[in-house]
Amino acid sequence: MTERGTLGVAVIGTGKMGADHVRRIHQVVSGARVSAVVDLDAERAKQIAARVEGCTAYTDPASAMAAADVDAVLIASPGPAHEAALLQAFEHDLPVLCEKPLTPDAASALRVVEAERRLGHRRAQVGFMRRYDAEYMKLKSLLETGQLGRPLLLHNRHRNAASPPFFTSSMLISDSVAHEADVTRWLLGHEITAVTVWRPTPSANAPDDLQDPQFVVLETDGGALSDVEIFVNCGFGYQVQAEAVCERGTARIGDGHAMVTSMAGRWGGTIAQDFVERFADAYDREVQAWVDATRRGEVTGPSVWDGYAAAAVCEAGVRSLTEGGRVPVELAERPALYG
C-alpha cells in the first residue's frame, strides 16, 4: 500500500461486472485505487486502464499480481477462470474479492478451500452481494432477534427480463439460484441437505430448449424449506423478492416500493431492469467493506467455504433438473478455519 494506506487493486476481467467494479473503486469506494486491470482482450484492457490515472493494463493475471503496486485482487472474470486466479493470488498471499461463482463446480471449489486452508488463514471473500443489500440485512437482523420465532419456510422469487443468448437450462441453477442457495444458508443459519427441481411448462417467451421457469425446493438441516421461483424471461424487468414464514409471523422484502406514483387514474412504480441497477448499493457496500477489512489486515464476509457450499447445492440442483427427483447435497468436512 502507499504511504497513505491506499489499497492498490488489480481487477481481473473487464466485462460488464469487472468494468463496473473499476468504476466503483475509482469513483465511489474510499481507501483504494485501481492499479491494474487484466483481460485476455489486450485492447479492451488498455481502454479500461486509460480511464484511471496510473492504472496498468495486463493480459496475464500472474504478471499483475507480481506488480509492486498491487496489494489486493478483485476477480470478475468468467467462472471457469476463477480457480487459477485464486490459486495464483494465494501464492502471492494477496487478499481477494472473488465474484460468484467461486468456481463452476464443487470439486474445483473444494480445491480452493483446501489451498486456502493450507495457507492457515483466510485470504478470499466471495461476492455474494445480497448479504450487503439493505433489505436482506434488515431481514437477517430481524430473524436473529427471534421475534418471529423459528423460521419454517423461505419463499424466493428471482426474475430477469430476458436471458442472455448463451444461457442454458442448467445455468438457471448454477448462475442464478446460486444466490438463493447462499441467502438461504445465511438467513436461516442452516446447511442445505437436498434439492428438488420441478419443471413447469416453459414460457413461450423463453428461447427454444430453455427450461424457463423452474421451481426449486431446498431442504435444510434445520427442518426449514426454501423454495425458489427462477424465471429468467419474465419480460418486465429484474425482480428479487424473499419472504420468511416463521412460527409467530412473516417478513417480506423486495417489493420495490421505494416510490409509488399516482397519476392519470393509475398508481405504480418502476422495476429495475438488471442486477447491476437493483443491487448497486449492495455492490458499493460490499466492495467498501472488503477494502476496509483488507486495510485492517482482516478478511470478512462470505468465505470460500460458503462458495463451495453453494457450488455443491447447485451441482445437486443441476442433477435434479436433468435426472429428476430429489438429490442429496454432499459436503466435505468443514475445516476449522471456517468456524
Image (cartoon, grey):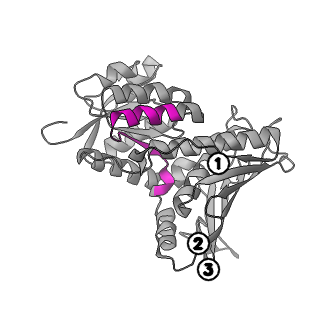
Give the mark nearest the N terminus, 1 or 2.
Answer: 1
The residue shown at (64%, 48%) is 177
Task: Estimate the spatial distance between the alpha carbons at disc 3 and disc 1, rounded to whole Å.
Answer: 26 Å
Task: Estimate the spatial distance between the alpha carbons at disc 1 and disc 2, rounded to whole Å.
Answer: 29 Å
Task: Estimate the spatial distance between the alpha carbons at disc 3 and disc 2, rounded to whole Å.
Answer: 26 Å
Residue 252 falls in image quadrant: bottom right
Mark 1 Cα within 10 Å, few/some/many (few <14, many 20+)?
many
Relative to residue 72, is residue 332 drawn left or right? right
- Residue 56 position within the rendered picture, expressed as x and y whole percent measured from the top left: 30, 24
Q: Secondary structure beneath disc 2?
A: loop
- On the image, numbered disc 2 is attached to which residue? 260
Nearest the viewer among 235 and 215 is 215
Per the rendered image, the range of residues in magenta is 110-131
Residue type highlighted by circle 3: Gly
Relative to residue 226, is residue 4 drawn left or right? left
Position of the N terminus, as image quadrant, is: top left
- Residue 262 position within the rendered picture, expressed as x and y whole percent measured from the top left: 62, 75
- On the image, numbered disc 1 is attached to which residue? 177
Q: Nearer the viewer, mark 1 or mark 2?
A: 1
The residue shown at (51%, 63%) is 136
Q: Secondary structure beneath disc 1?
A: helix
Residue type highlighted by circle 2: Val
Mark 2 Cα within 10 Å, few/some/many (few <14, many 20+)?
few
- Is residue 104 visible to us here? no
